[in-house]
């Protein structure tokens, strides 16, 4: 799988409901350095897999709307918004958070990631800035 395809498919996958997806896309020695609105997190493969299971408890559906996907050799950058529908309200889809991540690939899988996220601002102007670039 090409590096850009791997990263895009991971964030678009059902990794939060299917633990095998994490194994398919992430290197067993993967590390994620994540700056979120809740602070800094350093996650290894097992922590990422565990976090994905926790997402399934809260969200009925999780969808990545990718606006940017850039790759150069074994480095991929992605910008996207996650839209979610909750278990309590599965009929309403809301923007959850905006993300930018840079991943270094190893052995065809995501190995070292640097990610920044912030809570989604659902104003039309902001959401329009995340529209895919053609």
Image: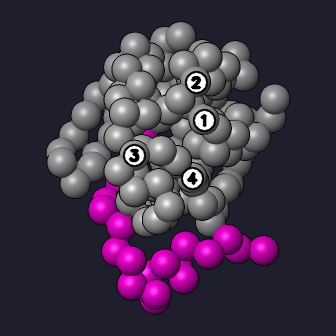
Q: Earlier in the sequence, mark 1 or mark 4?
A: 1
The count of marks equals: 4
Q: Residues within 10 Å of mark 4 (few under 14, many from 20)?
A: some
Query: Residue at point 67% right, 56% down?
Result: 69
Query: Residue at point 62% right, 66% down?
Result: 67
The residue positioned farthest toward the top in the image shown:
28
The residue wearing badge 2 is 18
Instruction: Indicate whether 23 appears above or below 99.
Output: above
Q: Earlier in the sequence, mark 2 or mark 3?
A: 2
Q: Earlier in the sequence, mark 3 or mark 1?
A: 1
Q: Which residues are magenta?
A: 114-134
The residue wearing badge 1 is 14
Residues at marks 2 and 3 touching, judged by CB atoms closer than 8 Å: no
The mark lying in front, picked from 4 and 3, is 3
Q: Residues within 10 Å of mark 3 (few under 14, many from 20)?
A: few
Q: Secondary structure at mark 4?
A: strand
Q: Earlier in the sequence, mark 2 or mark 4?
A: 2
């Amino acid at each position: 799988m090409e590096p850009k395809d791997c990263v895009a498919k991971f964030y678009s996958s059902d990794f939060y409901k299917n633990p095998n997806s994490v194994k398919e896309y992430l290197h067993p020695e993967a590390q994620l350095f994540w700056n979120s609105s809740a602070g800094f997190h350093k996650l290894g493969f097992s922590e990422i897999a565990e976090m994905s299971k926790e997402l399934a408890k809260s969200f009925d559906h999780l969808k990545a709307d990718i606006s940017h996907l850039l790759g150069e050799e074994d480095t991929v950058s992605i910008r996207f918004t996650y839209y979610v529908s909750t278990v309590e309200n599965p009929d309403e889809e809301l923007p959850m958070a905006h993300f930018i991540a840079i991943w270094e690939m190893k052995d065809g899988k995501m190995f070292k990631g640097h990610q920044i996220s912030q809570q989604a601002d659902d104003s039309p102007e902001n959401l329009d800035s995340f529209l895919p670039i053609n």
